[in-house]
Image: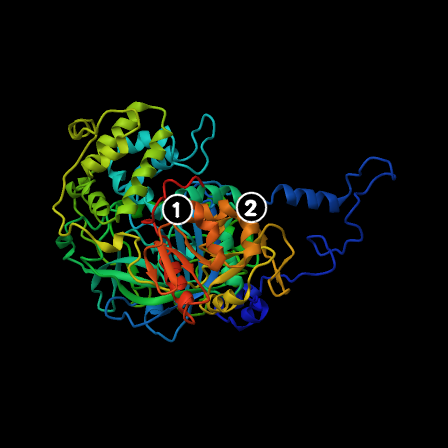
Amino acid sequence: MLPKRNVSNTRNTISNKKLEQLELFTIPVNSDLTSNQGVQLSDNHNSLKASDNGPTLVEDFILREKIMHFGHERIAERAVNARGCGAHGFFKPYISMVQYTSAAFLQDPEIETPVFVRFSGALGSQGSADTVRDVRGFAVKFYTEQGNYDLVGNSIPVFYIQDAIKFPDLIHALKPEPHNEMPQASSAHDTFWDFASLEPEVTNMLMWTMSDRGLPRSFRMMEGFGVHAFRFINARQDAFFVKFHWKPKLGVHALDWDEAQKIAGKDPDFLRRDLWECIDTGNFPEWELGVQIVDAGREDELGINILDATKLIPESQVPVQIIGKMTLNRNVENFFSETEQVAFHPGNLVPGIDFSNDPLLQGRLFSYTDSQLARLGGANFHEIPINRSVCPVHNYQRGGLHRQTINKGRVAYEPNTLANDIELRIDGNTAGFKSQSNLIGLSKSRNRHFSFDDHFSQATLFWNSQSVFEKEHIVAAFKFELSKVESSVIRQRVVDNLAHVDLKFAGRVASGLGINAPDLKAASGRIGFRHCRNSLKILEDATLSMAPRNIVNIKTRKIAILVTNGVDASPFRSLVMDLIEAGGICKFISIELGSVSTTTGKRIAIDHTFFTMPSIMFDAVLIPGGQESTTGLCSFGGAIHFVLEAYKHGKTICALNEGSQLLTTLGFSTDKTIDSITIPTPGVILADTRKALDGQISEFFQTEIAFHRHWNRINLDAVPA
């Protein structure tokens, strides 16, 4: 087992201005109890009564305070992105971006900027499961020396809609249907697909959410995107369009759909638990910040409208420049005070970064402030500790519910001469935030630019860029969602729209849904159908696929070691040590808790049972040898199911010596032999430790684990797990 990191020592070494500020508001655990007014309590078990058997007295202020506070402990959950988890960390730039922006936190590679990050699911309520199919929120608050900067993004680089005026309709369609409040955290119902079938602009986003991108293996293995085009402004007031990207150092990986549904039942906190445990044990998650920069005035050369949030800029067209790294290294001390009360807003900018005219972004600038006012009780939510900036704050805003700042002096206006006996006038100063001028047409219009009407070109690009197994997963996801739709008319409209993405793809989705073949003309003839297909400069982009391109490592990958009494420990001891040294997390799984005996009489402590920790909780499986142990596992249905399920989900399996007997039901061919190692199908290793060279099995096993999943293996659909 991995030794647990001394978290208290780890935290003591973390020092940044935000954590030091939060420490001022942190209350340690105390052995005494007091009221909220500081009065020490003598009894916290009994209310005050007229006699031992008499009525409770209304004068019991201790009871009243406790019950009153309990009744008001909950605040309204977020209308969207309600279920989330957060962590603290820091950001460091690799290079100075002075050529493009005057934002101070992007200049000095020696300066660490404190950050707080909140990951979330968009659809579900606070009590929903982590592993539902959904876009995830990826919001980062930078506590910079120039003020707070919020990069409020998603795990997918595009969005459903182009204009914020459609956002309430979109969310109402996605959320549980109002007559029965079902289904929870799922888009697989009539109201969403009714909306989607009538709004072709959602098509590109549908391709992303129905892909494996909607099922991240971990927040630590998930990309983040700013979605909108923003603008960098440098000291000369030169403007550049910019798109933000977060690239996880562990690579981008997903769950299988069957696996995700099972995890939702076994551990609905799977993603937040994964983040918490990795930080708690010192395996700090890291993402690199990248930017796509386009000179203002050259955006028309992209072939898309850069203000359209349903489109992305292909990386093969404008490469992502990696400019810095973010590390999360501290869990929250109190979920409500930090994660639940943190208030993000895309309008929280610093000098050097500005908005674009993206109509979806412009609507968000209103929506976020309004939401925080409703959730957090008034205009002073910026004074809640987690939301406070680390730089000095001074203005003449006063009063309001729960005001905490005590502002000295008689002056609450500007300009003035009474504050410091000199005239204070902030009127066109050279310092501070300045909005960059935008070219705005003189005529008012409720129309969209014609280029916004290209709803399918990038969806086609996304489809063309996927690997064979990713395409199979997308088709299966669409079929699952549409099978839940009761109206055949809606199902037909959806596949007719998909025909504009790729006719064969739409036909595969339509098959088995009880509807007609996809009809291009039927879709284009419907009211509201607008489509103006642009000529894309590229047909495929490898970065749109999650298929592994670079083998990273096995850091924090969880490996299940299946054992029972009579396991032969000597052949796998060095293998396990290699896995741990490489950053893997090894857990011993058996039929019962306690310990099992080895062939030499020693004992191995068991971490989990097959019943409490199934294969869906692991990334790979190791089956040691030992005839007695193998016989015991082969006679236990839970062990057989564990291995079959891991195989079906494409996970790496390594069996040593007699351990390979546990895989006989899969009908492997052993014609691909490398020395003492047999690879009967991708991601399955059968090894004879008595013949293998030292370290050879470990090398093979780690390489296969780093691939994450192996979907091109034999008999995958025949496995009944």
Type of residue at label 2?
Ser
Q: Do the residues labelled 2 and 1 touch (CB within 8 Å)?
A: no
Residue at 46%, 61% in the rendered image: 556
- Between 374 and 266, the one lying in front of the other is 266
Which image quarter: residue 443? top left
- In the figure, 647 relative to 390: above or below? above
Instruction: Name the disc covering residue 667, or none.
Output: 1
Which image quarter: residue 260? top left
Q: Can residue 563 be seen in this view?
A: no
- In the figure, 427 relative to 159: above or below? below
x and y percentages locating residue 583 in the rendered image? 46, 66
Could you give the CA–CA distance between mark 2 and mark 1, rounded to whole angstroms? 18 Å
x and y percentages locating residue 31 in the rendered image? 73, 60
- Between 349 and 680, the one lying in front of the other is 680
Instruction: Identify the image quadrant of the C terminus.
Output: top left
Q: Mark 2 points at which residue?
A: 635
Instruction: Name the disc covering residue 356, or none.
Output: none
